[in-house]
Image (cartoon, rainbow, N blue to C red):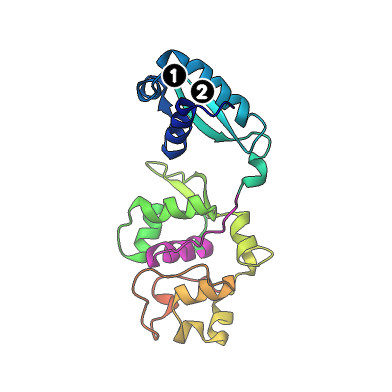
Amino acid sequence: MSANRDSKIIEAILFASHEPVHEDDLIQKITNKEKFNTCIEDLQTFYENRGINLIKTGKKWSFRTSDKIKDELTIFKSQKRKLSRAALETLSIIAYQQPITRSEIENIRGVQMGRGSIDHLMEIGWIKPSGRKNIPGKPALWITTDLFVEHFGIKDISDLPNKDELKASGFLEKRSAIATITDLAKTDEINDTENNLDEDENLEDFIPIKEN
């Protein structure tokens, strides 16, 4: 690359910009405007075999990571997901009462629910719709997924603790449903973002667990 002043100006502008720069704006910044194409070609040649390349998209120019190494620069991050108390209650109810409709979940919880809890659980991949109930309006039925079973470390949904097992473990008398689900997950990646239930509040208060 010829070390002329106009090439350096173009290079500096492109490096400093957080988005592609229109070539008309680049031309305005250099002295020998008729030499713009030459400057650009010199820069492209210089960066052709480097980690970044000079790329034109439409009428704009920018430096981009070379296609030859972009896969090596991919960074995967694990992000913790925080579930609200409402979402955890909803998940617990679906797990024990599936298939179940939205209105049935609301009846058990005693409150109307927005789309947030259902949408968040679907996004995580722990619940999914499973047909419609044959009643007026044909509301969607919700069930847990294979990913839910895998995450909570159980072989099958039937392996969730029943009422007697929860009582034997002391969960029904001493722990909230949120604590129960969290303990089953054996992970600290699920956190209650709202106020916890009282320590002596029964799981039975909002999850009608079926008797054996």
Disc 2 packing (10 Å; few <14; some 14–19; many ≥20): some
Say whether residue 212 is visible: no
Residue at the spot of label 2: 56
Q: Is residue 35 above or below residue 160?
A: above
Q: Is residue 27 above or below residue 162?
A: above
**Closest to the observer, 6 or 164:** 6
Determine whether label 1 and label 2 are within 8 Å by CB.
Answer: yes
Which x, y percent locates residue 101?
43, 52
**Closest to the observer, 145 or 67:** 67
- Which numbered circle lies on residue 118? none
Instruction: Check disc 2 and give the amino acid type.
Output: Lys
Q: Residue at x 46, y 18 (%)?
A: 36
Q: Residue at x 54, y 26 (%)?
A: 55
Specify whether residue 135 is painted magenta.
no
Q: Is residue 212 above or below residue 65?
A: below
Which x, y percent locates residue 210?
52, 70
Say whether residue 144 is visible: yes
Q: Helix or strand or loop: what does disc 1 sit on? A: loop
Which x, y percent locates residue 52?
59, 36
Specify whether residue 79 is painted magenta.
yes
Screen quadrant of the C terminus: bottom right
Q: Residue at x 62, y 25 (%)?
A: 45
Q: Helix or strand or loop: what does disc 2 sit on? A: strand
Residue at the spot of label 1: 59
Which x, y percent locates residue 54?
55, 29
What is the span of residues highlighted in magenta in the rendered image? 75-96
Could you tell whether 107 is left or right of 209 in the image?
Answer: left
